[in-house]
């Protein structure tokens, strides 16, 4: 299975309205089961995070953390990761730790 990205605004809005949210100081995760048989992810960074350089770094850090979690790619979930202001100033390991906690609560990755 391949991880696809969420690009449509209506998909983002659906997750914001109906999805479960998990909050940490460096990351917010929205999750909702989908009808596809694969994992879809989206990453959002607002202008509150900073200028374009900071927003791009946040996206890179979140993407790297996600691929390091070893999430089950066949899980039928839509995930949106929202960068917080602190995300631009921390290492990807810290973001990965928060992301693992969120994904464990959902059951996408097994507890170890």
Image (cartoon, grey):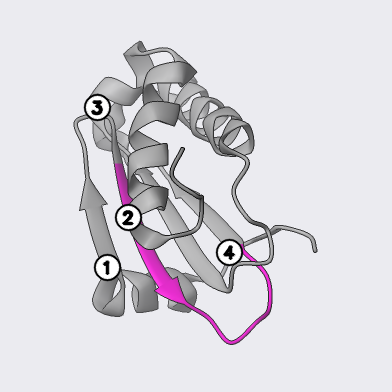
Looking at the image, which residue is at 68% across and 78% down?
A: 37
Question: Marks 2 and 3, how far apart in space?
Answer: 23 Å
Q: Which residue is mark 1?
A: 20
Which stretch appears magenta?
28-39
Q: Position of residue 107 (x, y in %)?
A: 43, 60
Badge 1: residue crowd in 10 Å (few <14, some 14–19, many ≥20): some
Answer with left or right where residue 90 lies relative to residue 41.
left
Task: Report, in whole angstroms, how far the alpha carbon at label 1 lies from the one at label 3.
Answer: 21 Å
> Residue 6 — which label?
4
Q: Nearer the viewer, mark 4 or mark 1?
A: 1
**Please, what secondary structure does the residue beneath circle 1 have?**
strand
Instruction: State the CA–CA distance, disc 2 to disc 1.
Output: 11 Å
* Residue at 49% across, 33% down: 62
Q: Nearer the viewer, mark 2 or mark 1?
A: 2
Residue 21 horizontal/vertical position (percent): 25, 60
The quadrant of the rendering that contains the N terminus is bottom right
Q: Are marks 2 and 4 in contact (CB under 8 Å)?
A: no
- Of the numbered discs 2 and 3, the one sitting upstream in the chain is 3
Local crowd size for mark 4, using a 10 Å CA cut-off: few (<14), some (14–19), many (≥20): some
Image disc number at residue 85 = 3
Disc 2: which residue: 105
Circles 4 and 3: CB atoms closer than 8 Å: no
Work out whether mark 2 precedes mark 4 in sequence or the reverse, and give the earlier one. Answer: 4
Tag shown at residue 70: none
Find out whether the residues at labels 4 and 1 contact each other: C-beta distance under 8 Å. Answer: no
């Amino acid at each position: 299975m391949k991880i696809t990205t969420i690009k449509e605004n209506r998909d983002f809005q659906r997750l914001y309205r109906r999805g479960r949210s998990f909050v940490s100081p460096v990351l917010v995760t929205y999750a909702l089961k989908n009808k596809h048989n694969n994992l879809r992810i989206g990453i959002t960074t607002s202008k509150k995070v900073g200028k374009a350089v900071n927003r791009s770094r946040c996206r890179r850090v979140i993407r790297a953390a996600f691929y390091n979690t070893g999430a089950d790619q066949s899980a039928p979930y839509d995930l949106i990761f929202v960068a917080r202001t602190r995300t631009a100033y921390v290492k990807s390991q810290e973001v990965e730790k928060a992301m693992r906690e969120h994904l464990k609560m959902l059951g996408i990755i097994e507890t170890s």
